[in-house]
Image: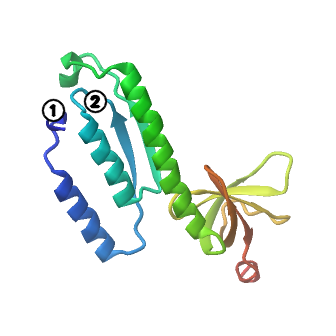
Amino acid sequence: LKNMNRKHTIEYYIDLVDKLRDSNPRIKFSSDFIIGYPGETDKDFENTLKLLNKIEYINSYSFIFSPRPGTPAYNLRQIEHNVSKERLILFQKFAQEVKMKYRKKLLNKKSLVLFENKLKNSNEFFGRDEYSNSVIVKSRKDLKGKIKTVIIEKANQNTLFGEIDDQSLKKE
């Protein structure tokens, strides 16, 4: 959108993403999305969905535009709230599909995880992989503060579940 005062085009952005991927094929992307920014057309929204699919964001954070006093956008004509809400619901549905497609590719693969803490009342530990995905594993050993290789067995919308790779435990 021109009225968002961005200094780049979508083509420039996609070209930059392609260059980053050429330089590091393992790179992944996350982004924030403002839905219903003043002046957003149906075509603009469709292009946002196309971008979501093209870039394959592993995480996206989306919200409806909210005018902030003192900002240039504060006095712009707002999109009808029900239109913005419908778009947000559709965007989040598509974003979830992209995220689950990515997570399914992780099943039965190894991932390095830094464990942060033990879950209350269980033998489960919570950590994050190198892409900041939440990972939970069962362990009788204290994993807090340790980096372990985990074989991902299951995934849901928010969390990956796995088992410590035996080779990872033998290195202790």
> Are circles 2 and 1 on residues that touch, CB within 8 Å?
yes
Quadrant in which the C terminus is drawn:
bottom right
The quarter of the displayed image where residue 46 is located: top left
On the image, the x and y values in percent for residue 168 come to 70, 79
Element at label 2? loop
- In the rendered image, which residue does mark 2 sit on? 37
Label 2 packing within 10 angstroms: few (<14), some (14-19), many (20+): many
On the image, the x and y values in percent for residue 95 come to 46, 48
Residue drawn at (29%, 69%), measured in percent from left and top? 20
Number of the label disc, if any, that sits on residue 72? none
Residue drawn at (57%, 62%), measured in percent from left and top? 103
The three-letter amino acid code for the residue at tag 1 is Asn
Which residue is more in the foreground, 118 or 46?
46
On the image, the x and y values in percent for residue 108 come to 66, 74
Quadrant in which the N terminus is drawn:
top left
On the image, the x and y values in percent for residue 126 come to 69, 55
Query: Residue 124 vs residue 104: left or right?
Result: right
Residue drawn at (61%, 50%), measured in percent from left and top? 157
Q: What coloring was used for the rendering?
A: rainbow
Query: Residue 60 vs residue 7: left or right?
Result: right
Q: Is residue 106 above or below residue 119?
A: below
Query: Residue 74 vs residue 91: left or right?
Result: left
- C-alpha separation, residue under disc 2 versus residue under disc 1: 9 Å
- In the rendered image, which residue does mark 1 sit on? 3
